[in-house]
Image (cartoon, grey):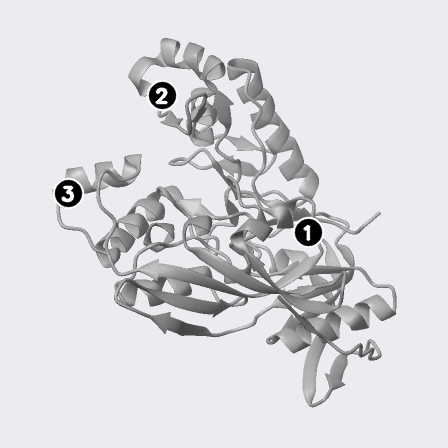
C-alpha cells in the first residue's frame, strides 16, 4: 500500500520551513549527548522531527545538497564513533499513542516512532492488555523497536506486530510494511540487513490481547514469581516483576552510561552446546529454540570467563549482568572496541562461540 508524494526540495538552512512546517536544525552537536553510551564525536547537523511530513522535508533537503542522513531515536541501541557524523542526524520525535480498534478479544494500538517504548508499554498495561508487558523497561523509542525486533522474558515485538508506516527514501513515498515485509528474526529485521538506511519509520501498529500471560514464564521471571509466591497474574503484575528484575540487571542509562544488552544471546547448534552442558551440568541456562538449536545467555558465557565486574579500557562489565557494558571512564570509541574484542576473544577461546554485538554503529560514511 503506497501513498504517492509530490517532490518538494527546499534549501538546507538552520531553520527549515515549508507549508507552515518548521524544523529547527542544530549544528555541530556531540553524538555523546544523543546516545546512552555517551561516546562519539560531533554531528554536522541535528534535526528534530515531530511528523511524517517533517521526516520527508528533512530527508529531501539533505539529499538535495548531498548530505548523508542517519535516523536516531532514543540512542539506547547505538554506538557512535569518534569521527562523528558528517551529515544530518534526523532525531525522530514523532509523538502519539492512539487506539485504532477494539473488540472483545483485543485492542489495536498505533504509536508514533518518537514515543518512548516504555511509555507505550505502560499505556497498554493500564488498559490491561497483554503482549508487550514483559518488555517493560526496555530503553529507547518506539521506532527503534522493529529495527532489532526487541524482546525480553519470552516476548518479542514480532508477536504483536501488525504493520508499520515509513518513508521510503528510495521511492519518495510513504509505505505500509507488514511483518512479512520486515523479515523479523531473533534481534534482526530487514532494517538491519538488506533495507538498512532505506526506510524511516514513522508509526507502528500492534495488536494486543485482553487476556493475561500464563505460566510457565521465561526462566528468571518464573523464578521471581516462585520466590514471591505469586500465583495470580495480570499485565500489571508481570510489568512490576519485570521492572524489579531489570532494576538489578540493567542499570539506568541516565545514571550509568550503557547501551543495554551489549551482546546478542548466541543461538548455536546442539553439538556446540552439548560439551558445555556436559561440563557445567545444570548450571548452564540453555533454552531450546528448535530441534537442533539452543540459545545460551551471552552474560553467562562472559561470567564463566571471570570478566564480571572487570574494567576493560574504561568499560566495566556489569557486576550483576555481564552482558551489559558500562562506560565508567572510556573517552573514545577505540576504548569500547578494545574492551569488546577482549570479551569476544575470551568467550571464543573458552567456548568456541563468537559473540555478536547487539547495538548498531554510527560513523561518517566512507
Q: CA distance from mark 2 to mark 3?
A: 24 Å
Residue 93 lies left or right of residue 171; in this view the side is left
Front residue of 240 and 222: 222
Q: CA distance from mark 3 to mark 1?
A: 43 Å
Relative image position of residue 298 (x, y in whole percent): 47, 30
Q: Which residue is mark 3?
A: 228
Position above or below: 133 against 51 = above
> What secondary structure is found at the residue carrying circle 2?
loop
Q: Which residue is mark 2?
A: 284
Q: Give the residue displayed 60% in from the left and 76% down from the top.
A: 51
Nearer the observer: mark 1 or 2; the answer is 2
Relative image position of residue 295 (x, y in whole percent): 44, 28
Q: Which residue is mark 1?
A: 40
Q: Give the residue displayed 29% in from the left and 17% down from the top.
A: 282
Position above or below: 116 against 9 = above
Front residue of 94 and 292: 292
Labels 3 and 1 touching (C-beta < 8 A): no
> What secondary structure is found at the residue carrying circle 3?
helix
Front residue of 46 and 61: 61
Relative image position of residue 82 (x, y in whole percent): 73, 48
Q: Report the residue that reaches farthest toward the front.
A: 1
Relative image position of residue 138 (x, y in whole percent): 43, 52
Amino acid at each position: 500500500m503506497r501513498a504517492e508524494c509530490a517532490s518538494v526540495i527546499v534549501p538546507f538552512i538552520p531553520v527549515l520551513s515549508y507549508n507552515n512546517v518548521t524544523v529547527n536544525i542544530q549544528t555541530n552537536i556531540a553524538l555523546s549527548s544523543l546516545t546512552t553510551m555517551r561516546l562519539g564525536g560531533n554531528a554536522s547537523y541535528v534535526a528534530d522531527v515531530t511528523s511524517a511530513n517533517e521526516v520527508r522535508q528533512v530527508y529531501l533537503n539533505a539529499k538535495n545538497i548531498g548530505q548523508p542522513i542517519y535516523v536516531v531515536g532514543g540512542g539506547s541501541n547505538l554506538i557512535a564513533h569518534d569521527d562523528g557524523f558528517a551529515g544530518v542526524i534526523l532525531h525522530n520525535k514523532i509523538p502519539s499513542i492512539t487506539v485504532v480498534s477494539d473488540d472483545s478479544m483485543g485492542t489495536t494500538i498505533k504509536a508514533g516512532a518518537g514515543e518512548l517504548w516504555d511509555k507505550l508499554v505502560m499505556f497498554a498495561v493500564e488498559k490491561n492488555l497483554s503482549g508487550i508487558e514483559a518488555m517493560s523497561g526496555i530503553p529507547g523509542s518506539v521506532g527503534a523497536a522493529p529495527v532489532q525486533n526487541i524482546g525480553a522474558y519470552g516476548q518479542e515485538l514480532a508477536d504483536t506486530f501488525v504493520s508499520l508506516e515509513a518513508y521510503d527514501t528510495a521511492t519518495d513515498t510513504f509505505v505500509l510494511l507488514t511483518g512479512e515485509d520486515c523479515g523479523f528474526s531473533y534481534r534482526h529485521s530487514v532494517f538491519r540487513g538488506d533495507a538498512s538506511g532505506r526506510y524511516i519509520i514513522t508509526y507502528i501498529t500492534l495488536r494486543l490481547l485482553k487476556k493475561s500471560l500464563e505460566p510457565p514464564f521465561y526462566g528468571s521471571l518464573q523464578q521471581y514469581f516462585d520466590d514471591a509466591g505469586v500465583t495470580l497474574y495480570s499485565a500489571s503484575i508481570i510489568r512490576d516483576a519485570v521492572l524489579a528484575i531489570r532494576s538489578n540487571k540493567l542499570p539506568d542509562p541516565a545514571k550509568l552510561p550503557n547501551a543495554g544488552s551489549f551482546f546478542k544471546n548466541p543461538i548455536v547448534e546442539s553439538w556446540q552446546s552439548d560439551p558445555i552442558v556436559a561440563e557445567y551440568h545444570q548450571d548452564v541456562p540453555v533454552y531450546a529454540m528448535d530441534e537442533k538449536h539452543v540459545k545460551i545467555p551471552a552474560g553467562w558465557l562472559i561470567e564463566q570467563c571471570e570478566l564480571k565486574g572487570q574494567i576493560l579500557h574504561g568499560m566495566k562489565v556489569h557486576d550483576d549482568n555481564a552482558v551489559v557494558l558500562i562506560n565508567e571512564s572510556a573517552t573514545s570509541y577505540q576504548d569500547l572496541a578494545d574492551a569488546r574484542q577482549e570479551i569476544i576473544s575470551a568467550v571464543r577461546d573458552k567456548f568456541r562461540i563468537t559473540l555478536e554485538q547487539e547495538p548498531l554503529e554510527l560513523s561518517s560514511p566512507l
